[in-house]
Amino acid sequence: MKKNINGLPLVALAKGSIDLNEIGFDFDGVIADTAATFVKIAAAKYGYNSFSKEDITNFELEDCIDVPGEIVERIFTEILQDSLGTGLQPINGAVETLSLFAHYSKVTIITARPIAQPVHDWIETYFDKPLLDKIQVIATGDHDDKIRHIHANKIKYFIDDRLATCNSLIKENIIPIVFQQPWNEGQHNLTMVSDWNDISSMVNIHR
């Protein structure tokens, strides 16, 4: 039996094998294309235009692109505080798939952002009003604080783009699903999805 990097058995996820009410979602890098917005702001506002999203091969951006740490932090603060104003866009298929899910069940988004309101504002812009009450946003302020909220919401599967988070979930009997991004490619053997079509095919919305 294949094992993940923690030495635990890998879980194979068949088509339609996940109950909709048992899956949760990260926001940045899974639902919203935060890295693309970072690249755009870095070029337009700060003059750093020598890299693309594909060059972001490490979750710690300072380790893979030539942008000072204080500028990286400043740009991300802008995005976190004003997601709409900075032009943060959805990842292809995210709004459509989550809208479908919200017709059948509560959708739980758990983000490491320190404040939830900019995410609420973003969701109110991109999702139809009748669905808003079905979308729950939890802002933990810390990547490592997601686990207790995942347990509290009885979530068994969680989709995240940050490998360190995914690895920590395994130890808590939560099944991580890695959303493929340049900063996690080729660095793990966990269950992975490359887009929202993959996510849709894994989830059974009719149970």
Image (tube, rainbow, N blue to C red):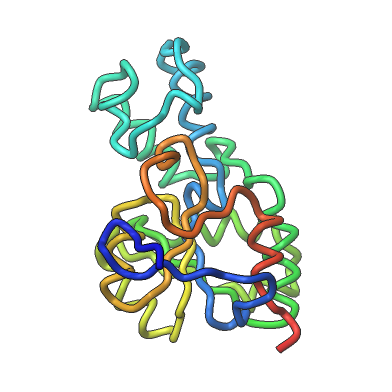
Residue drawn at x 32%, y 65% as measured from the top left: 140
Residue drawn at x 47%, y 35% as measured from the top left: 182
Q: Position of residue 172 (x, y in %)?
A: 28, 76
Quadrant, the N terminus = bottom left
Q: Foreground residue, 174 or 191?
A: 191
Q: Position of residue 130 (x, y in %)?
A: 75, 74
Residue drawn at x 42%, y 65% as measured from the top left: 176
Q: Position of residue 18 (x, y in %)?
A: 60, 77
Vertical placement of 207 versus 192: above or below?
below
Q: Position of residue 139 (x, y in %)?
A: 38, 64
Residue 107 figure quarter: bottom right
Q: Image check: 32 left or right of 124?
A: left
Q: Foreground residue, 184 or 77?
A: 184
Q: Foreground residue, 192 or 89?
A: 192
Residue drawn at x 57%, y 70% as measured from the top left: 13
Q: Residue furthest bottom?
A: 207
Vertical placement of 194 versus 156: above or below?
above
Residue 201 figure quarter: bottom right
Quadrant, the C terminus = bottom right
Q: Residue furthest front?
A: 1
- Give the mark count: 0
Q: Image check: 113 left or right of 201?
A: left
